Amino acid sequence: MKEQMITVEEQGLHLVFRVSEEGDVTLLHIGTSQLDMELIPKDKIAGYRMLELQLTGEDRAEYHGRSHRASFPGLRLIYRSHEDSRNAQGRKLVITLYDPVTAITVEQHYQFYGKTIRCWSTVLNSGSEGVALEYISSLAFTGFGKEGSLDRSDKLKLYIAHSGWQSELQWQSYTLPELGLNHLADRGSKRLAFSNTGSWSCAETVPMAVLENKENNTALYWQIEHNGSWHWELTDQVDQLSLLVGGPNEHDNHWWEKLEPGESFTSVPVSFGIVEGGFEESVAELTQYRRSIRRPNEDNELLRIIFNDYMNCLWGAPTTEKLLPLIDAAAEVGCEYFCIDAGWYAPGEWWDGVGQWLPSIERFPEGIKYVLDYIRDKGMIPGLWLEIEVMGIHSPKLEETDDSWFFMRHGKIVKDRSRYQLDFRNPKVIEHANEVITRLVEQYGVGYIKMDYNINAGIGTETGADSVGAGLLEHNRAYLNWLDQTFEKYPELVIENCSSGGMRMDYAMLSRYSIQSTSDQEDYVNYATIAAGASAVLTPEQAAVWSYPLREGDDEEVIFNMVNALLLRVHQSGHLAELSKPRLALVKEALDYYKEIRPLIKEAIPFWPLGLPDHQSEWVSVGLRHQERSFIAVWRVRGEAQSVVLPLAGRGFESSDIRIAYPEQHGSELSWNAEKQELTVTMPQGKVARLIELT
């Protein structure tokens, strides 16, 4: 075989693959500039792997430690063919490899969506004997940072969004040595590994990251588009940094899958790109990409305002008597959806009894449809809370089930927080879920469902699967398929993705769902930092943020609450019927302004004048940039400094008309320094927030 180079130049990106005389395929370069071959010594080329694949019983090579590099037959795969084509999404490259020992065939896919590439691998057992998969990469890339003179320990910065219940979206940046990956050898056993194992995809970290090169002002970004277990890692390889990204694997996530002759497996999709710039430029590209892969829907066009009765309000104990005044108040301030949250299906404590989803007569003596019709009569679309994926351990619905409905491990039904996990591979579970949705939509007239998910089903299920991790992956994909079918049947139905707040903020889910709960955070001051970081993880028009004015609060507390949500999606709550008229007027003023600017929010790109927020900062700020009008939210969350300086150089605001847009009566001052392109914001003392508009 003659050596050949496969080059792709598309949307400002350069990809270079090499096929050796022996047929070994390597990925030498992904970047915004062309490859300089002098940067890659000939004896290192073989280390620039395009794909890693580990089969059970096969060897490992080098000092790999727990890293998934140096795999077999990954190192043995040889070139068979490649196809370079175009489709509705954009350009697509497929490289096909073959293992002469096991006779398996592997396809590596690269699909362009603008400047972002979605990639995945498909393994086909084209041999005569069964094989077993332990690891398969969706993206393998070695050599980011090879350009320039500085060492990667000095020039690379990694951005991670840590997460937890009520503490979502905690963005932190690190040098690689700060995480323990010092560049001391050409290869080693140390890796920086980030994983999720279980049915909460964002239980500890969000499945995305940005790696910034400060020396040449470029950044690599990636996101894993999966609603279950996933894994990515950085390690040393051939004196370069090597990145491996994918879904579940055996060593990290309890996933193992056997392929009989003729069977195939497709890995979890991963999207990535490289931009000129840094974190903000990466998020700008991701924002456009996320909009392009999302299911077209009316909700992300209209950005209607939701009132939900749960947070700092009814706390899962709704009744007709409690709801009617709230419905009146929500309509008065301009809400457009009214969602009755948890508790509508049980007279008292309900946590371990859910699963039947029939309304409580005690809570709604006239029937729940009376309240839902009342909502519609007030000009709002009615909604209900639901947790369709679980069944309580004391649910009356259990009489109609058997073990096949649920996740099983070691012969026992899996429990978590007094709930059972339904297995969406089971046709009876699908039938049950469809019956519930049909009842809510067609009988009750519901147009909005808050779909919650408050357990983590753990490593998976052994039922009908080669491993518990494989069972989980199959269930994850079956649930997505059910969602697709539900939206096909009810295209106008809005379903909110909620998993104890933001525990499943991934784009397997968010390519279907139009709106995502970002947190269950109960303190409005703490929520500011979560809200400010949300637009880096999901599009602004999908990021629902609670605004819940308190009974005992003052004007500034209302304003702070409203600013939390005004550049995203408004999740209004709180005892609005009990607020004083001036404080209720502040809520209405905010929502009226939101209706004015929401056509811009769905097209705008986020930025962070003070850098990414953290919970130690005194000041927090986030902006949305649009060609017509741009917006900046500013919060003082602690401290006593009266003013903060927002650096805005390079963002096109040099001759802007700048004003405080909310509230109208603000007691604040703005000062623009044209020479330095800095905006100084001075606000009253205390925990205070303002929304600024730039034209």
Image (spheres, rainbow, N blue to C red):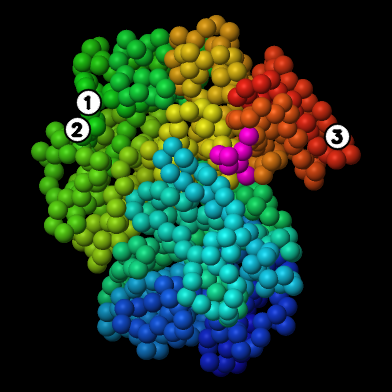
Left or right of 514? Residue 425 is left
Residue type of the residue flagged with mark 3: Asn
Which residue matches tag 1?
A: 349
Q: Which mark lies nearer to you, 1 or 2?
A: 1
Which residue matches tag 2?
A: 353
Residue drawn at the location 65% of the way across and 63% of the way down: 156
Cβ atoms at labels 2 and 3 below 8 Å apart: no
Cβ atoms at labels 3 and 1 below 8 Å apart: no
Query: x, y (%) of residue 40?
Result: 66, 82
Left or right of 125? Residue 32 is right
Query: x, y (%) of residue 146?
Result: 67, 73
Residue type of the residue flagged with mark 2: Gly
Q: Does residue 542 lie above or below 105 as drawn?
A: above
Q: Is residue 325 visible?
A: yes
Which residue matches tag 3?
A: 673
Residue lying furthest right in this view?
675
Residue 531 falls within the magenta-colored stretch: no
Q: Earlier in the sequence, mark 2 or mark 3?
A: 2
Query: x, y (%) of residue 408?
Result: 19, 54
From which residue to which does the magenta span run?
612-618
Query: x, y (%) of residue 329?
Result: 47, 11
Q: Quadrant of residue 606?
A: top right
